[in-house]
Image (tube, grey):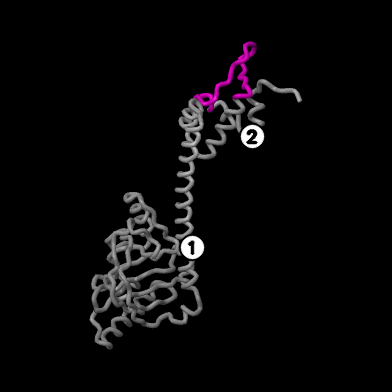
Amino acid sequence: MKKKDTFKIGELSKLFDIGVDSIRYYEKVGILHPVRNDENNYRMYTIDDVRRLALIRELLGLSFSTDQIREYDEDRNVKSTTELLQTELDVVDAEIAKLKATRDSIQNRLDTITSLCSPDIQDEFETIVIKELPDRKCVMVTDDNLPDDYVSYYVVKYMQSHNTRIDTIGACDCYTLDIPGSNPKSKYYRTKNVFFFAPYLEDADCNYVLQAGRYLSMTYKGALTKTKELLPQLYTYAQDHQLEIASDPVEMCHIDDYETNDDSEYIIELQLMIK
């Protein structure tokens, strides 16, 4: 086989299946150094440039910057190669950990939704139960009353200002209800705040705690207007059983418009802390 000593830019482009603009860019940033043909000034690439371009593509695939590639190629030895691979291994391990955390979050949210849609659970809807609950760490987005349409806006605003992430699909958006401040003619109660609760939330991201204690709880399926119909039953239950109310009620939207456009599929839990 006849050995080829030099290559035109089009030949390299075809060999590596990349655009000629990319090859020109590698020259511009100083990691590829073609010579010029004396007769026509065309770029000519040597067999060493082929080796270098293969290295460039490999390291770019490992997320190295062009500056790192240049420094490595200028001082390439066993020590620098070992250090380079160890650095990349650390990056990959960090990415794996990040992907695992993302996967765990998705799995937890999926488990939450599927468990709430279980026929066994739905048989207990609109029944009052007493729950003994631990401290529950949450992310308080705002301690103001918000129209429903503005919740997503404030969630995004909170994430940007706190450099964090709130996965709303499958999480539970919650609202402390302001019973005295509510309009009796409205189909909805006025809210005091908006916060998110999910067991998988990182402690570092949480800024609010639902206190441990005993809670009257009722879960229902359907439109949010049912809250105003059903919440009085919790107060009546507390009165009938001589239970002292310890806090404002909380509306916990396990499934709402973050998960479905059909409000008949909403699953909402009302909780009222008692002493």
Q: Earlier in the sequence, mark 1 or mark 2?
A: 2
In the image, is residue 89 above or below residue 75?
below
Label 1, label 2: how far apart the Cα atoms are: 38 Å
Residue sitting farthest toward the front: 78
Q: Residue at x 45, y 44 (%)?
A: 90
* Magenta range: 26-48
Residue sitting farthest toward the right: 1
In the image, is residue 142 above or below residue 11?
below
In the image, is residue 181 above or below residue 93?
below
Q: Label 2 belongs to which residue?
A: 17
Q: Is residue 54 magenta?
A: no
Q: Callout 1: few (<14), some (14-19), or many (20+) C-alpha neighbours within 10 Å?
A: few
Q: Nearer the viewer, residue 75 or 248?
A: 75
Q: Residue at x 32, y 59 (%)?
A: 206
Q: Position of residue 155 (x, y in %)?
A: 36, 56
Q: Residue at x 30, y 85 (%)?
A: 237
Q: Position of residue 112 (x, y in %)?
A: 45, 68
Q: Label 1 belongs to which residue?
A: 107
Q: Nearer the viewer, residue 88 or 126?
A: 88
User: Horizontally, is 270 left or right of 91 in the view?
Assistant: left
Type of the residue with mark 1: Gln
Numbered disc 2: secondary structure: loop
Type of the residue with mark 2: Asp
The quadrant in which residue 134 appears is: bottom left
Q: Position of residue 233 (x, y in %)?
A: 33, 82
Task: Decide if residue 190 is in sight here.
Answer: no
